[in-house]
Image (cartoon, rainbow, N blue to C red):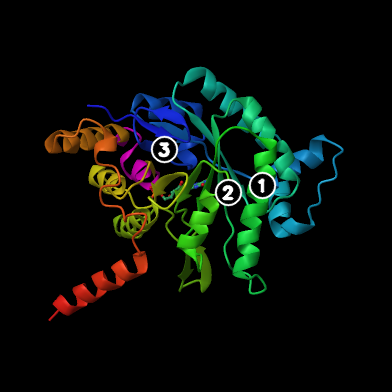
C-alpha cells in the first residue's frame, strides 16, 4: 500500500509530519522520528527576537529592537548567545543524517530585519520554512486589516529572500478566516498549516495568579480542524497541512478525507512517545486496506466541500438539521 504524498513540492513517504515542538529540537529525536516513519519533521521554532538578538550581537547591522518591548529583553537575558548558530548546526546535522525533509520553523510577528537572515536557513539545508505567525488580535488598536497586512508584508519580504517552499502556520482567530486563508493561498506561498494553538491561560485560585494552562491539546479539538479543513481544502491554491487535535490513526484518516495534504502531530507524541508514529502509519494503512484504497489520492478530499459549495449555507442547514432532531 502506498502512503506517499507530495507536500510543498516534496515527496513524503507518509502524510504524518512531526509538528514543531520540543521533541523536534534534538538530532536523536529527529532520527527516531524518521525511523518510526514520520513523513517529514518541522523543527522547534526559533523566535524572530532570537534572530534580531543574534544580528545585533554579531554584526554592525542596525536592528531596531523598539518593536519587541519586553520580549526582546527576555531573549537577551534568557536565551543562549549562540542559539541561532546552534539552530543552523542542527539543520546541517539533520540534513546529513536524515533522508526525510527537514522543515525549519520561525515564530514571527513582524517583517523587521530578521528576514535578512532567512537565506541562512535555506543555506543551512532546510528543505522548506514554516512560519509560525504568532499574530493574535490582542491589541485593541489593531484592526483586522492591520493584522492581515502584517501577514502579507512578511510573506512578500520573505519570498524575495528565499527560494525554498514557504508554509504559513496560522491560528483560527480571523474574522474572515475562509476569505483570508484563500487570499494567503494566492500570495505565492506553498502551504498553510492550520491551526496553531496559542498558549492557553489559566488562573491559580489559591495564589490568585495567572498560569500557563496545559500545553497539550485534547482529542475534542480535532472537530474544529476537521471543519475548516473540509471547508477550505478545495478552495486554496496551496497545500493544506492540518494540525491540532490528532490523537489516533482515525483522526489522520478524517483529516485526509476532509482534504488535508498532510497532517502534523505534536501532543500525541508527548502522550504516547515518538514510537507512536508507527502506530499511526499502521492504522492509516489498515484503514486503507479495509477500504480497498491503494493510495491516498483515491480518498483524499472525498468529504471536502466542493470548490463551488457555499459553506455558510451548508453549515446552516447542518445546524438546523441537528437541532430539529433534538427532542
Ligand atoms: C510542548 C509543545 C511545544 C510546541 N512548540 C511549538 C513551536 O515551537 N512552534 C510551533 O510552531 N508550534 C509549536 N507547538 C504547536 C504544535 O506544533 C502543534 O501545532 C499544536 O500542538 C497542535 O497539534 P497537536 O494537537 O498535535 O498537539 C508546540 C506544541 C507543544 C505541545
Check contact, mark 3 vs mark 1: CB within 8 A: no
How many residues crowd mark 1 within 10 Å: few (<14), some (14–19), many (20+)? some
Vertical order, 261 against 89 (above or below): below
- Tell me, yes or no, if residue 100 can be seen here: yes
Residue under the image location 55 percent in, 43 percent down: 189
Pointer 2 or 1: first along the chain: 1
How many residues crowd mark 3 within 10 Å: few (<14), some (14–19), many (20+)? many
Is 155 a magenta residue? no
Residue at which label 2 appears: 187
Residue at which label 3 appears: 18
Instruction: Residue 144 in the image: state x and y as whole percent.
Output: 59, 68
Residue under the image location 31 percent in, 34 percent down: 277
Query: Could you say which disc has been placed on residue 230 in the image?
Result: none
- Could you say which is closer to the camera, residue 18 or residue 53? 18
Residue at which label 1 appears: 156
Magenta-highlighted residues: 265-276
The secondary element bearing badge 3 is classed as strand
Check contact, mark 2 vs mark 1: CB within 8 A: yes
Camera-nearest label, 3 or 2: 2
Instruction: Residue 203 in the image: state x and y as whole percent.
Output: 47, 70
Amino acid at each position: 500500500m502506498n502512503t506517499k504524498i507530495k507536500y510543498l513540492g516534496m515527496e513524503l513517504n507518509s502524510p504524518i509530519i512531526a509538528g514543531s515542538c520540543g521533541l523536534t529540537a534534538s538530532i536523536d529525536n529527529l532520527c527516531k522520528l524518521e525511523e518510526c516513519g514520520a513523513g517529514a519533521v518541522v523543527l522547534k521554532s526559533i523566535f524572530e527576537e532570537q534572530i534580531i538578538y543574534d544580528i545585533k550581537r554579531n554584526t554592525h547591522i542596525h536592528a531596531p529592537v523598539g518593536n519587541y518591548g519586553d520580549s526582546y529583553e527576555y531573549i537577551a537575558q534568557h536565551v543562549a548567545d549562540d542559539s541561532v548558530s546552534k539552530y543552523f548546526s542542527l539543520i546541517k546535522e539533520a540534513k546529513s543524517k536524515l533522508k526525510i525533509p527537514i522543515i525549519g520553523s520561525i515564530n514571527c510577528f513582524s517583517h523587521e530585519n530578521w528576514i535578512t537572515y532567512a537565506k541562512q536557513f535555506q543555506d543551512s539545508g532546510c528543505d522548506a520554512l514554516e512560519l509560525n505567525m504568532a499574530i493574535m488580535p490582542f491589541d485593541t488598536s489593531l484592526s483586522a486589516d492591520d493584522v492581515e497586512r502584517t501577514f502579507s508584508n512578511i510573506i512578500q519580504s520573505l519570498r524575495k529572500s528565499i527560494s525554498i517552499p514557504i508554509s504559513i502556520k496560522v491560528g483560527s482567530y480571523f474574522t474572515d478566516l475562509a476569505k483570508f486563508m484563500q487570499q494567503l493561498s494566492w500570495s505565492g506561498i506553498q502551504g498553510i498549516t492550520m491551526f496553531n494553538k496559542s498558549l492557553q491561560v489559566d488562573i491559580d485560585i489559591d495564589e490568585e495568579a495567572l498560569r500557563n494552562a496545559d500545553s497539550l491539546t485534547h482529542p475534542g479539538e480535532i472537530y474544529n480542524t476537521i471543519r475548516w479543513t473540509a471547508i477550505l481544502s478545495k478552495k486554496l491554491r496551496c497545500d493544506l497541512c492540518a494540525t491540532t487535535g490528532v490523537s489516533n490513526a482515525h483522526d489522520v484518516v478524517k483529516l485526509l478525507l476532509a482534504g488535508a495534504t498532510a497532517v502534523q502531530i505534536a501532543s500525541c507524541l508527548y502522550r504516547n512517545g515518538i514510537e507512536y508514529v508507527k502506530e499511526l502509519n499502521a492504522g492509516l494503512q489498515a484503514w486503507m486496506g479495509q477500504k480497498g484504497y491503494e493510495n491516498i489520492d483515491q480518498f483524499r478530499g472525498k468529504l471536502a466541500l466542493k470548490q463551488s459549495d457555499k459553506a455558510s449555507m451548508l453549515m446552516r442547514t447542518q445546524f438546523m438539521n441537528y437541532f430539529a432532531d433534538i427532542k
